Amino acid sequence: MKRILLLGFALILFLDVAEAQVFSNKPVGEKQKRVIDSVKMAEYPYALPILGDKATGAGFELPYSAGVSAQYFWQQSDLILENMMVGFNNGQMYDVDEIIRFNKAVATASALTVRPDIWLFPFLNIYGILGKSQASTDIGFGLWLPDGDNNFTEVLSASTLVEFKATSFGLGMTPTIGIGGGFMALDMNVVWTDVPQLSKPAKTFVFGPRFGKNFKLPDDKAVTMWVGGFRVHLNSETNGSMSLSEVFPDGSLGGKVDAGFEKVENAQNSVDTWWNGLSQAEQNNPVNKAKHNKANQVLDTASTILVAADAALSTIGSSTVQYSMDKRPKDMWNFLVGGQYQFSKHFMVRAEAGFLASRTQVMTGVQYRFGL
């Protein structure tokens, strides 16, 4: 049972694929009058962004209209896993949420992504995402069974590490504007992560508002600093299927099933001893009846699942296990701080860190821009 519970956990990738911080900026102030006049008078030479000539005519400095970036991203985040169900050979699914409880679920992921982008409008950047990732999920869980008074007790605990590789793809957009070097960028994207063990790609929605300041240096160089937030939303339901021979390559399923039967039998004896020790009046008490019925229901479910797993042992070469669960990050938001160095209007590098709450992340990237 231990390994079966791990099948659905290796599917969480949080990808912060925001662009390097370039934006349409309107210089202001008397000191910038020469820059403002030159921007207004210059003829805009590119097809994109749409209305680019209008924006420059209004005094906005525009970045090059197309670019490509490469980014490395690492993150670690706590997860909440619930509503777990398992089944065998495409048969009945069993709810194990009451008897399997998680005390730790930590997802760690690293990814390398490539992101082409264009400025569709002077204040709207759109981009695509393609990435390869490597991830792991560290899980701690326990088997909980009721005792005679219907108090659940942990009778078995375990932990394990699941590792996997995946491919990610997605789309995003960043509405942004700058005035006097200060800027606001509202990055948002949808990423699908294709994990072979899942029936369909896991979908992640990321929203990352950033607020910062650009400091110009000679020869088109610049330094940009910003702060912001990072919010992740996952599609909550996950399901999939795997071969039992792949789940238990060491052939350990039989020993785990036998240990499970022993634990259930001990718990059932405890419940029976408690019930038989009650007087007739105490057994007729609705509260005691409810406790007794609930304990028997949980133990019956545990026994049924073990019987199904035991039956699957006879055809382990061709049997499969199915699973489904709901998942969510422990904290949807965390804080961001980042910076960028611009070598020229064509080339820039950036770094960003996220912290506070239960998620930590680091991202570095390089970008090349050109006119289109």
Image (cartoon, grey):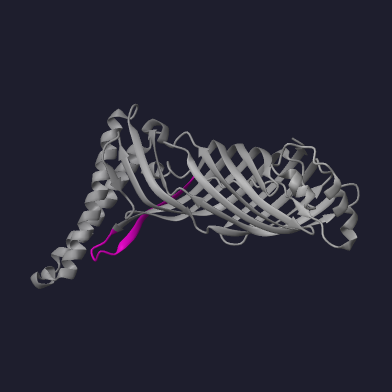
On screen, residue 192 versus residue 245, left or right, reads: right
Figure quadrant of the C terminus:
top right
User: Dividing the image into 4 quarters, which one contains the N terminus?
Assistant: top left
Please tell me which residue lies in front, 351 or 370. Answer: 370
Left or right: where does residue 50 sit relative to residue 168?
Answer: right
Q: Residue furthest left?
A: 280
The answer to whether 196 is drawn above or below residue 340 in the figure is above
Residue 336 can be seen, yes or no: no
Q: Is residue 107 left or right of residue 325?
A: right
Residue ID at (59%, 46%): 15
Q: Position of residue 363 (x, y in %)?
A: 68, 48
Q: Where in the figure is residue 188, as x and y percent of width and height?
A: 59, 49
Query: Quadrant location of residue 322?
Result: top left
Q: Where residue 334 appears, x then y in whole percent?
A: 59, 59
Q: Position of residue 317 (x, y in %)?
A: 35, 27
Give the dominant element type of the magenta stretch: helix, strand or loop: strand
Toward the viewer: 357 or 295?
A: 357
Q: Does the rendering let one see residue 153?
A: yes
Magenta-span inclusion, residue 288: no
In which image quadrant can residue 42 be found? top right
Start-end of magenta stretch: 146-161
For this orientation, the residue located farthest to the bottom is 281
In-front residue for pair 340/174: 174
Q: Is residue 30 above or below residue 249?
A: below
Extreme residue toward the top, this view: 317
